[in-house]
Image (spheres, rainbow, N blue to C red):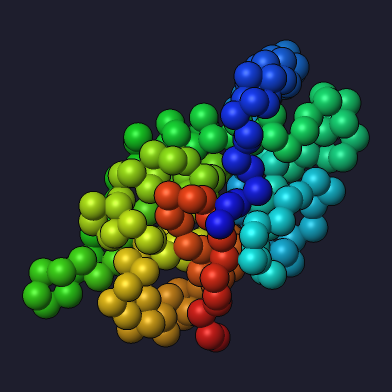
Amino acid sequence: MANGFQIPSLQKYVATILAALAFSMVQSEDVARRVGVILEGTFETHEVNQALEGAKLTQIVPFYEWDYGVRSFSEEMWNERGFEWESFFSIATKVADTLVEKIEPTVYRDRRGVIDYITIADEDPFLTSIVFSSAFHEKFRDALGDRIFVIPIDRHRLHLFPATGGKLEFNGPKIVEEFRQTELPVSLEVLLVDKDGVQVVGELER
């Protein structure tokens, strides 16, 4: 299983150089700051996007930060800066790595004290990119197991469940209702995160 962004070892050095050059070009803009990826619902239209393995309703979109928030890259800007997905994604994962270090998860437990699920909420626009950080899996594997289900319910909120034990199924109706009321919805697709990467394995029923 792979998420489509794992760089072969022989190309890693070249990709790193390309990423650094691309990043410096973006940084040369007066208003540009970070660049990264954001998970978006496919109902959103973007000129540049990438499919997530197994997804029908979720897409990966490159964004750049400026004084008034974030903007997705136009095809023209993307091409002008010479970006390619492999090099850009290496930048995005560095942003994600930093976010994993600062996030403050909220843990919910059942009556026995066993973890039900974990919620991660943060106003950082690149929050959803944390699923692509290897540090994300390392941070939560002890609490949730080697295989972690993630629901990208909102651009600023993720729900994490152990992939075994039926916790997601039990809490599914509550998550669906929450999705209907959210302001920046992404999707109800279920992302499986493990040591091999990220892929979509299903969707919560509405």
146 sits left or right of 62 in the view: left
Residue 43, image x and y in percent?
A: 74, 66
Name the one closer to the observer, 7 or 117. Answer: 7
- Note whether residue 171 is visible: no
* Residue at the (63%, 43%) spot, across then down: 5
Nearer to me, 108 or 166: 166
View extreme (front): residue: 10
What residue lies at 51% left-to-right and 50% top-to-bottom?
A: 197
**Residue 65 relative to residue 106: left or right:** right
Residue 131 in the image: state x and y as whole percent: 48, 49
Quarter the N terminus occupies: bottom right
Q: Work out whether 166 lies above or below 184.
A: below
In this picture, is 175 found above or below 121?
below
Q: Is residue 152 left or right of residue 15?
A: left
Quadrant of the rendered image containing residue 87: top right
Residue in the image at 17% along x and 74% along y: 110
Seen at 53% across and 85% down, the residue is: 205
Where does residue 170 sit, x and y in percent of width and height? 33, 83
Image quarter (top left, top right, bottom left or bottom right) of the C terminus: bottom right
State how many labels appear. 0
Could you say where residue 51 lies in the image, as x and y percent from the top left? 71, 56
Q: Is residue 144 visible?
A: yes
